[in-house]
Image (cartoon, rainbow, N blue to C red):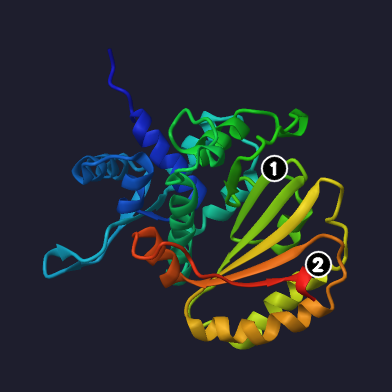
Amino acid sequence: MAKKEITNKQKLILLLSYTFRFLNSRQIQEFLGHKDHRRINSWLKDLEEKGYIVREFKPVFGQLTKPAVCFLTAKGRGYIRHSYTYQFPKYLKKISKDKGTSKSFRIRCQIIADWYLTFYQKSNNEDDKIKSETGIDIIDYLETQLKTDVDEKYEKIPTKSKQFFTSAYYPSLILLKEIKPDGYIRRKIPQGIVHGLLFVLDAYIPRFLLRYKIQGIFEKLNEENWEDDTVHSLNIYFLCPNNVVITYFRRLVPSFLQSYYGSKPLNFYFATRNQLYRYKDGKDEKIKWLIFSSTDF
């Protein structure tokens, strides 16, 4: 019997790379739940040698100071295109330019992956888990969409289960096209759907861009074309590079909330990257979010 070109685990690695665009080897190990990092590195090396991925790392004095960062090659993207009933050509075209992306963008992609690993992959609450075939909920959901004619499929949202999406596949919510978050979260409860938008801010972002981003969000929200009977509330999460940025938001956001006239509750959450990683590593019991709610204004 001929040996498979790639294994099932390696196929999962390609789908993870497609979903998050840039992942480091430690994250891939965590996604796959594998204890032996040498096995992960062996799979990655094999995928690189066969031309499916690029591995980038910076050797210093003959040692790796950071885990290798991986992303898809043209052959890796071709695997996705030819292995599924592909429905998302614009996204595949977008990630074809990943080789020339900035360091800050690559870091942002890895932070988004760590967000998922922190709040979804590691969830101990059975109500927050979707029945998973691969052990990776986001991949199970994505595979279903890649194999299905999306336009003709009624999408059933599991009650009480949190779902996380990257732009690899966003469902049909108008805010996702207009505001373009880094990640999307939804949770169906008896009262409706709680929507969440995640923004990961780059380091050294100018203040005028912060104000422009908040202003743009409120302009779209005040158009009210996103509100319907299924919406329970909207949560917007900002993961900031430092506390200086959060201090600026502390002064900025209340003034915008005072002019918000939507009928659905709107909540803003602010925390730093460091808070996320302290929580992820078990150093803090919870993230101390700075929260602003439209119900308070």
Question: Is 190 placed above or below 197 here?
Answer: above
Amino acid beneath label 2: Lys
Q: Quadrant of the N terminus?
A: top left
Callout 1: few (<14), some (14-19), or many (20+) C-alpha neighbours within 10 Å?
some
Give the distance between the C-alpha atoms of the residues marked 1 and 2, in whole angstroms. Answer: 23 Å
Label 2 sits on residue: 220
The residue depicted at 11 percent of the width and 70 percent of the height is 61
Label 1 sits on residue: 188
134 relative to 236 in the view: left or right: left
Callout 2: few (<14), some (14-19), or many (20+) C-alpha neighbours within 10 Å?
some
Q: Secondary structure at mark 2?
A: helix
The residue depicted at 63 percent of the width and 81 percent of the height is 249
Question: Is 23 placed above or below 82 here?
Answer: below
Kindly indicate the quadrant of the structure image that contains residue 88.
top right
Question: Is 105 placed above or below 42 here?
Answer: below
Q: Name the one closer to the observer, 84 or 75.
A: 84
Q: Residue 227: image x %, image y %?
A: 85, 55
Q: Name the one closer to the observer, 30 or 61.
A: 30
Amino acid beneath label 1: Lys
Q: Quadrant of the C terminus?
A: bottom right
35 relative to 99 in the view: left or right: left
